[in-house]
Image (cartoon, helix red, strand yellow):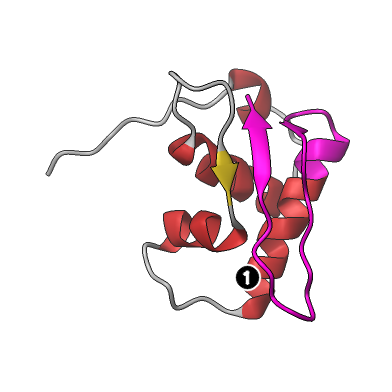
Amino acid sequence: ENYDMVYLSKKICSDKGLSHMAFGSYVALKSLHRIDRENTYVSVNMLCYELVNSMNFSRSFKESIVLGIKELIEKGRIRCQDFSWDKAAEEWWKCIMKV
């Protein structure tokens, strides 16, 4: 089988202070990010699908991705121009990632 390579930052991989949620979210973001573009627009569902290769995931899994993204933003690992998630409406959020 032919697999695409995802290159992860050594700084992220060696950061013992990152939660599993943040690391998983980072891996999903990196796998969707195109190097030839400055910005990447993603949704929670896109990130979840990227990690499990299925649309069958729980609400708690989606919430853990959101928590992971928030942690990455708070720790300065990613920059995000727009980040929102309306739990009541399960509205997709969009994030502009600059890695």
Does residue 38 show up magenta in the picture?
no
- The one nearer the camera, 58 or 94, is 94
Q: Nearer the viewer, residue 15 or 30?
A: 30
- Say left or right for 82 vs 51: right
Residue 2 seen anywhere in this rendered image of the structure: yes
Q: Position of residue 62 (x, y in %)?
A: 64, 68
Asked if 33 appears above or below 20 in the picture, the reply is: above
Q: Quadrant of the N terminus?
A: top left
Instruction: Identify the image quadrant of the C terminus.
Output: top right
Extreme left residue here? 1
Foreground of the two, 83 or 68:
83
* Residue 83 in picture, x, y percent from top left: 78, 48
Q: Quadrant of residue 61?
A: bottom right
According to the image, label 1 marks what residue? 61
Please state the extent of the stretch shown in magenta in the rendering: 71-99
Q: Secondary structure at mark 1?
A: helix
